[in-house]
């Protein structure tokens, strides 16, 4: 009760295509997806993180910054990782360097001083 068709169906394909080339061919879509993710997601994020680290390292007195809490201010003193930031109206806060989100174009408004 042996069917020769079953034996032929279970045999490897002729020409040896089931070897290394077949394994590489089945992994190719996965490798291609990883390469696409690297160039579209991973690499741009690493570049952005590097720019942010460089910006944090270059902070100095007089720079206008935006903190992680959403406050705009101007750096009045730098002491290692601690920045003293003037928020306007004689309000000065100490902020860790890592909590500066970005450089800002906006300056704190000085209300009440020097106005008529």
Image: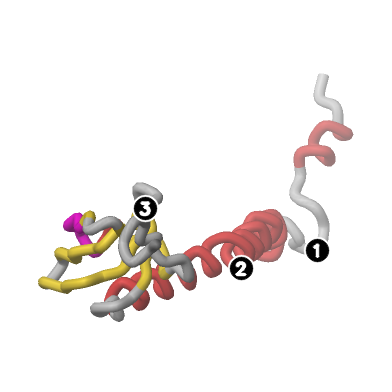
Q: Which mark is residue 15?
A: 1
Magenta span includes 100? no
Residue appearing at x 35%, y 77% in the figure: 54
For residue 19, say whether it is visible: no
Residue 103 location (% of width, % of height) = 41, 70
Residue appearing at x 76%, y 60% in the figure: 17
Looking at the image, residue 85 sits to the left or right of residue 10; the answer is left
Residue 26 location (% of width, % of height) = 69, 54
Q: Look at discs 1 and 2 and give the one toward the viewer.
A: 2
* First along the sequence among labels 1 and 3: 1
Compared with 59, 110 (above or below) is above
- Residue hosting label 2: 39
Q: Which mark is residue 71?
A: 3
For residue 115, say whether it is visible: yes
Magenta stretch: helix, strand or loop mostly: strand
How busy is the neighbourhood of tag 3: few (under 14 within 10 Å), some, or many (20 plus)?
A: some
Q: Name the image quarter holding the N terminus.
A: top right
- Seen from the viewer's position, the closer of residues 24 and 54 is 54
Residue contact at pointers 1 and 3, CB within 8 angstroms: no
**Outermost top residue:** 1
**SS label for mark 3:** loop
Coloration of the structure image = secondary structure
* First along the sequence among labels 2 and 3: 2
């Amino acid at each position: 009760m042996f069917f020769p068709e079953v034996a032929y169906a279970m045999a490897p394909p002729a020409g040896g295509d089931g070897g290394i080339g077949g394994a590489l061919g089945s992994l190719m879509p996965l490798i291609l997806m990883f390469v696409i993710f690297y160039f579209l997601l991973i690499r741009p994020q690493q570049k952005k993180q590097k720019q942010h680290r460089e910006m944090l390292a270059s902070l100095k007195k007089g720079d206008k910054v935006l903190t992680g809490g959403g406050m705009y201010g101007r750096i009045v003193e730098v002491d290692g990782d601690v920045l003293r930031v003037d928020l306007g109206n004689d309000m000065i806060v100490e902020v860790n360097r890592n909590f500066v989100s970005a450089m800002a174009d906006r300056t704190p408004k000085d209300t009440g001083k020097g106005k008529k």
